[in-house]
Amino acid sequence: MIRHIKTAKASIEQGGTDSAVTRTVEALLAKVRDGGDKAVRALSVQFDGFDRETYRLTKEEIAHCINSLAPREREDLDFAQDQIRRFAEAQKAALKDIEVETLPGVVLGHRNVPIQNVGCYVPGGKYPLLASAHMTVLTARVAGCERIITCAPPFQGRIAEKIVAAQALAGADEIYCLGGVQAIAAMAYGTETIEPVDMLAGPGNAYVAEAKRLLFGHVGIDLFAGPTETLVIADDSVDGELVATDLLGQAEHGVNSPAILITNSEKLARDTLAEIERLLQILPTAAVAGKAWEDFGEIILCDTVDEMVAEGDRVASEHVQVMTRDPDYFLQKMKNYGALFLGARTNVAFGDKVIGTNHTLPTNKAARYTGGLWVGKFLKTCTYQKVLTDEASALIGSYSSRLCLMEGFSGHAEQANIRVRRYGGRNVGYAMPADPV
């Protein structure tokens, strides 16, 4: 039997897309689409208090940002990017172009083709989330994208130097100090000085996420992103302090970030509640994390491990941290999650910043139908076909002729029939079905 030790007061799902946010974003997108660079500048001044002739950073400005890193900071950035690059390269190596002869003279194949122009957004209003540069720019670079541009807002009224350094080290071709909807719109529509992109990637606030949603179709996007979510699945092999630390560590993202514990130990559930109250007295980001826990925190008590699996799949969380005696059981059994963090030795912060897996992951139960951002998102798997012999063309043509006419497509059928006539040497009436070979 499943019981709730703590129930969330609110639900992200219930709210859906805020119509006021949609209207605001639609108006901002139209301003940039119609007004170009002038509109981008006006909106940057309005929202970020940041004004310059051009928002593209010069080589000298980028070099200054890189050189401003302390040696330890540079080593840490290099280490993180090495891990992310290494895993992305391994993922790409697993994607093979194929070509197969399915019938004598019939060759089918596919190629994994990099998207040419990609725009990567790196959020930085509340926190300078430079890790998002690794996750987007670097992954697109490994995929082989020809042109990668990237935008990040100013931080506290100035160029966010650490973000820019991360963007440059990750391999960005163009770097803009530009944030919010105006950045997303400028990359998608293009302006007088910014060439448009084919795909947008990267997280952002509600306005950035809504801009990406509205632009989907005009450009591709990585994911429909919502507030950060975390789910901890734990048994009594761990203690309340560890669980509470991991829940609050993600709840600090925002006041609407769900943090959920699923356990089969009532003692662990009660201990976690007590530890959360204690840690909120000393956590510097307690104002945010505490509100998120109050409104969106849950503790779900299950009787069995299989109930824990089922509840985990129902929640379909962005991050799922498993701290049980047999975490691999959940790896084998669970189906709905953005990323798994298996065992007490790892945690979501490792994935967010350094370990190598991507931190741009599905939210709002989207883990039911998609995984997160990875090198494959920047590749198009495109098929091709070749027919190498007259006999194969006539054979496929005769089947195609009849199948097209079953659907009422005479013009389609004639595409097949003309080849049966030319390559098979057979008479077929116009818009009539070809006889079997």
Image: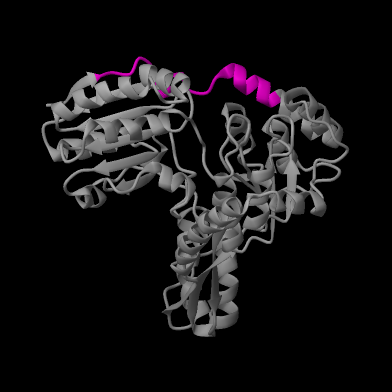
Quarter of the image where one finds residue 140 = bottom right
Name which residue lies at 73% across and 27% down. Answer: 48
In depth, the one of 214 and 250 nearer the eye is 250
In magenta stretch: residue 24: yes
In magenta stretch: residue 413: no
Does residue 88 appear in the picture of this structure? yes
Does residue 371 appear in the picture of this structure? no
Q: Residue 50: image x %, image y %? A: 79, 30
In depth, the one of 14 and 157 nearer the eye is 157
Assign the C terminus to one quadrant of the image.
bottom left
Compared across the picture, whether 18 is left or right of 403 comes to right
Outermost residue to the top? 9
In depth, the one of 110 and 32 nearer the eye is 32
Compared across the picture, whether 117 is left or right of 87 comes to right
Name which residue lies at 63% across and 31% down. Answer: 125
Assign the N terminus to one quadrant of the image.
top left
> Quick check: 61 above or below 1?
below
Which colour scheme appears in the figure?
Answer: one colour
Outermost residue to the front? 71
> Quick check: 6 above or below 261?
above
Compared across the picture, whether 199 is left or right of 191 comes to left
Q: Residue 280: image x %, image y %? A: 37, 21
Q: Residue 238: image x %, image y %? A: 20, 39
In depth, the one of 37 and 243 nearer the eye is 243
Labels in figure, total? 0
> Quick check: 11 above or below 73?
above
> Quick check: 154 above or below 273?
below
Q: Residue 172: image x %, image y %? A: 68, 55
The stretch in magenta equals 6-26
